[in-house]
Image: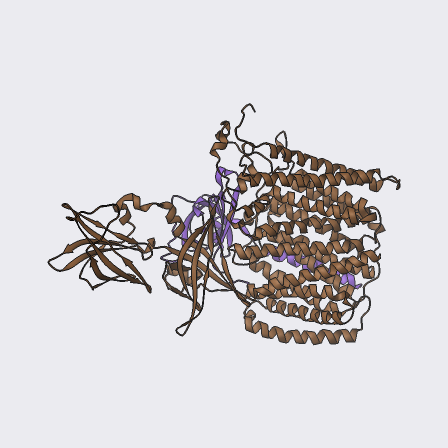
Amino acid sequence: MKKSSIFGIVIIAIAIAVIISTYSNTSTYGSFKDARQTSSELHVVGKLNKGKELFYDATKDANYFSFYVKDNKGEECKVVFAGTKPQDFERSEQIVLTGKMKGQEFYASKILMKCPSKYNEKLNVTEANATKSASL
Amino acid sequence: MDTVFKGEHLLPGSIGQFFIVLAFGSALLSFISYFFATTTADKADNWWLRLGRIGYWLNTFSIIGMGVCLFNILYSHYFEYHYAWSYTSRTLPSYYIVSGFWNGQEGGFLLWMFWEAVLGNILIWKAKSWEKPVMTTLALSQVVLGTMILGLQIGSMHIGSSPFLLLRNAMEAPIFQNPNYLDFIKDGKGMNPSLQNYWMIIHPPVLFLGIASLVIPFAYAVAGLWVRRFKEWVVPAIPYALFGCMVLGTGVIMGAFWAYESLNFGGFWAWDPVENASIFPWLFLVAGVHVLIVFKNTGHSYFTATFLTLMSFVLVWYSSFLARSGVLGETSVHAFTDLGLFWQLVAGLSIFFVITVYLLVTRWKEMPITKKDEETYSREFWMFVGAVFLCLSCFHLIIVTSVPVWNAMFGTKLAPPTEPVKHYNVIQASFAVVIALLSGFTQFLKYKKTDVQRFFISTVIYLIFSALITALVVYVTGIYKLHLVFVLLMFCSIYSVVANAKILADALKGSFKLAGSAVGHIGFGLILVGALIAAGARSVVSINNTGERYNEEFAKDEDPRENILLYKNEPVKMGQYTVTFTGDTIEGAQHLFNINYQRVEGNKVTEQFVLRPNVIQSQGGMSSSPDTKHYLFHDLYTHITMTNVISSEQANPDADQHGPADDDKKYDAPIAHEIAVGDTMRYRDGIIVLKGLNKSAKIQSIPLTDKDVAVGAQLEITTNGRKYNSEPVYLIKGKSVFDFGKKLEDAGLKLRFTKILPEKGKVEITVYQQKESEKKYIVMKALSFPYINFLWAGTIIMVLGFLMSIFRRNKEVKAV
């Protein structure tokens, strides 16, 4: 067999491996109900319940922020984020949480929010990352 | 429209809009003329060629005209234009007006067109026999870009988005019924605070020059296939391809530097989809350049060389599509939102993709493809392998970054990896291992046939040598604690640097030709080394050791200790530093926080400096920018994650006017002390000493007569190693008694002189101390990036290498 064909096969094998590893690494968008049924991390899209308390008090703990989110299926859950309160959090229109369920609370490792700007003309997206930063 | 609006400046917009249409028309003319100039059989007839050039010059002129008009609008603060209103404001410093220019998508397109115009003029001057077919492609590209800013409304659909759109046409609001509406629009929204950084003035022009320059190798490849000069196009295309790699690479790294300097990502690269998209074309073109050189030297790999060159430009359009169409939506922090250009971007992408596929298919049989295999011990074979691995690395980035695209195409609901940084780091590092290794030992090989024994000896010697250095580096920096693949990558990167240093040493002695590639690869190796140590050995300095935890259970699992709380003027020990938040100042839109760092050894202060991270408020949002202390071997990076300084000021800007009752709410319950002169009172944060009584105290704005008694209590407050003085006053005027309390904002105290007790020889001082939660504080995060200077130095060296190669390859063009 020619060397180039062997090389070609190797490359195709690597490409397939990449696709598979990517696919197995991608998570899914789900609800709090789904989060309760799995132990792995997933993304939950929802809205902030502005009626309930947003708790962040730097004087008590600078790395604890909790709030309530209603997911797209309408279920509400308390969310805890290990970091500071992202700026303009109250104004967010939609929130994408990454994390998992611990008991009755959802522990978010990342918050991505969409804020309406003035006149609702464009959406600004901001992101907040939780602590575990040195994770190379 | 019957209403006549007052105060609008319609002239610059009308001229600008005219230039937009002219630019589009002239680009179209130029494209058609160059097309016929290429295809027409009569070589003596220069009529089409001349028309093509005139069209292109006119296009260049109009683009400059547009730029002048837009700049005029921004500089004069004509907020009747949507662009000026959206991205600038009167308070914006004038040098940021320049970055306002490319703040919006339209400005980005304009910049792209501008550079393409400049490059086109260089080609008209330089390309000689290639001018006709090459300029056809450039003119076509100008046509496609021109449509993006046309701003034509046809029925319900619109083509392009014009930077000269009026505010009243951009949005619907009742205010625009009013002919005097401009009287109500005093100021623009201002620039997004994170863009208010000097890197934003220089990064976009460089990036767009890189993006624009990728059209040239593409145009040469297209021309070569189109007019069937299959082999000839490669040599003149190589210097341009190298130029594209150099400038685009610089632009991307500048973006990384901007992120590092001004964003609170906590790093220089976050694997954000938009960041990834910006290096797709770069990876492909770098691979392409290598294979082009292989083809030039050996005649092998023609198809791959052509394919990569063509695809790198298609990927430019793909990454524009990702960044600008809004498709990334909820996966990216800094993707633009949809301007209604989605299908237009798809069309632009398709045009260049279809050209690529069409030419490759129709010319397939005529291509000079070799049937022979390359030798195993030949440089061309391993360069080819390296190029393929660069493409694989890019392939992986494309697959993952495009998850939202797959969702849109196939209706799936995949989400990106939950730990994207880890995912990308591990897989990309694996590819980088191979690429770095190849960039080292391939340099020892020769084209066609190599002396195997010598090759193995030199390869092995340098492998062993690098292994020793790696062991040292890995031990010192602590990289060995990470995933094995990062240790391997460190080894291969160091090997690449060492091997290429050897090649460079030889090149300096003998033929200087190879020096460019050696320098370029040394730079690339250093970039990898720097990125690896800086990201891998990065550590959080601001570990919260106060033991204050709100929720023990939560803290146990997450160990969230990376943010630290600093009350004003209360020093906190943080790692080897003692940090104090000493105050804040407002400079323009920036709110700077002064943080004093002290390093104490024994009883001596060995080092002291102030970092001033800032928080910018604009467009109703806040953005926090870090400040960094640069050392030679590491950087100390600090940013504010939370503060009550700004919000509390907004909530009650003039708290004093709310009356005493309201004011007292900010304090804990008052404590009255009966003390004599010389006595000491304690409070939570320090002590207060009554130094003496001032019998002749004066009060501003109240004239005193002889019958009035005014006594001041001279108090000295000591808190956190600082001393303050305060003198509250007790006043008897007529039959009424008053007391004038004094506030000490810095110490968080309010002191009142409430009674005189002559029978006891004492006075009563009432102490109000600020509630713990009302005290001014900041929450900050400090990170240490070791050896990050390798990354920046590597970039400069790599650019230098590209530059040397451009000069070398350019000489070869003249020789041909």
Q: Which residue corresponds to the image point at 12% horizontal and 57% vertical from the top-left?
A: B758
Q: Residue at x 70, y 48 (%)?
A: B314
Closest to the observer, A129 or B518? B518
Image quadrant where one finds the N terminus of chain A? bottom right
* Above or below, comparing residue B455 to residue B809 in the picture: below
Q: Position of residue A55 (x, y in %)?
A: 38, 51
Q: Position of residue B36 (x, y in %)?
A: 82, 39
Closer-to-camera residue (A34/B14): B14
Query: In the figure, B14 relative to B93: above or below?
Result: above
Q: Position of residue B65 (x, y in %)?
A: 66, 39
**Is B413 positioned to the left or the right of B457 in the image?**
left
Chain B shade in the render? brown
Looking at the image, the residue that sits furthest to the front is B706
Q: Is residue A130 left or right of residue B446?
A: left
Q: Which chain is purple?
A: A
Residue B687 lies, in percent from the top left, at 26, 63
Q: Residue at x 45, y 56 (%)?
A: B640
| Quadrant of image for the C terminus of chain A | bottom right
Relative depth, front residue between B724 and B332: B724
For this orientation, the residue located farthest to the left is B759
